[in-house]
Amino acid sequence: MRKVILSAICILTLLSLETAGQTFISNKCDSTVLSPAEIAKCRIDSVYQYDLVPKINMITRLKTEVLPKHRKKRTALQFSDSLRKKIRAFKQIYDSTLNYKLEVFGSDMDRNQRYVQPKAYISSLLTFQIFKFYPDVYAILFNPVHLDLTPKTKLEDRERILKLLNEIIQLIPEGEREIIFASAMELDKEAKVAGEGVPHVFQGLLNENERKPYILVNYIIWTE
């Protein structure tokens, strides 16, 4: 049910922006109903509406321009049965971890916003939904922040998943790996252009060389 609600929120947001002459309504911050802390949260919520258009535009560019352009090339890749099995296992780990974290993040955000910041809530949802459209394995699985951030990732689980990532990379012949990485980098760069001005969370401080294996695996698990 929660997934249906989240999807409905995003769809309604898109429709509201496309309706001629329609604008976001103001929050009703009623001091006779809300506590002083809730009033403060409610009154500053309007600033978050300016996050919505850039994020929706980014998602639109990803889903209608960037990803369709690269999908055919990615789906044409052929892998051995043993490698494909590992790729699918990794994708399942990514999806299940992402869904669980988004469930917790959504509840925590709403509680921290004292349930009276709808625009901040939708803005945050859009930020995290981007991880569903195209994977970011470092952001969701390997960033050390998850060792402390609720819901916490166990160190041994992180090491186990990292081992699987390295196994996937090593099973790809080196020459083929470089070709696939070039395609992955091209998509990654275009995605960044599509999201220019939109902040991305959980990116850490990795340099370009350190990001290479994660960018490669993002591309490999994307269409599985």
Image: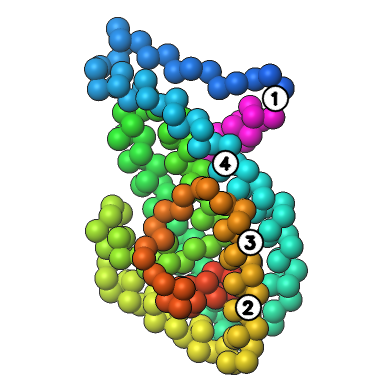
The CA span between labels 3 and 4 is 16 Å
SS of the residue under disc 1 = loop
The CA span between labels 2 and 1 is 40 Å
Say whether disc 1 or disc 4 marks the residue closer to the N-terminus: 1
Mark in front: 3 vs 1: 3
Name the spot of residue 212 as percent of width and height, x first. 49, 76
- Whether residue 8 is visible here, answered yes or no, is no
Q: Which mark is residue 182?
A: 2
SS of the residue under disc 3 = helix
Q: Which residue was labeled with disc 4?
A: 54
Say whether disc 2 or disc 3 marks the residue closer to the N-terminus: 2
Amino acid of disc 4: Pro
> Mark 2 and 1 residues: CB-CB less than 8 Å, in contact?
no
Q: Which mark is residue 19?
A: 1
Say whether disc 3 or disc 4 marks the residue closer to the N-terminus: 4
Mark in front: 2 vs 1: 2
Q: Name which residue lies at 43% across and 67% down.
A: 138
Q: Which mark is residue 190?
A: 3
94 with respect to 179 (left or right): left
The CA span between labels 2 and 4 is 28 Å
The CA span between labels 2 and 3 is 13 Å
Residue at the extreme top of the image, as rendered: 32
Q: What type of secondary structure mainly makes up the magenta span?
A: helix
Q: In the image, is residue 152 above or below residue 29?
A: below
Q: Which residues are magenta?
A: 4-19
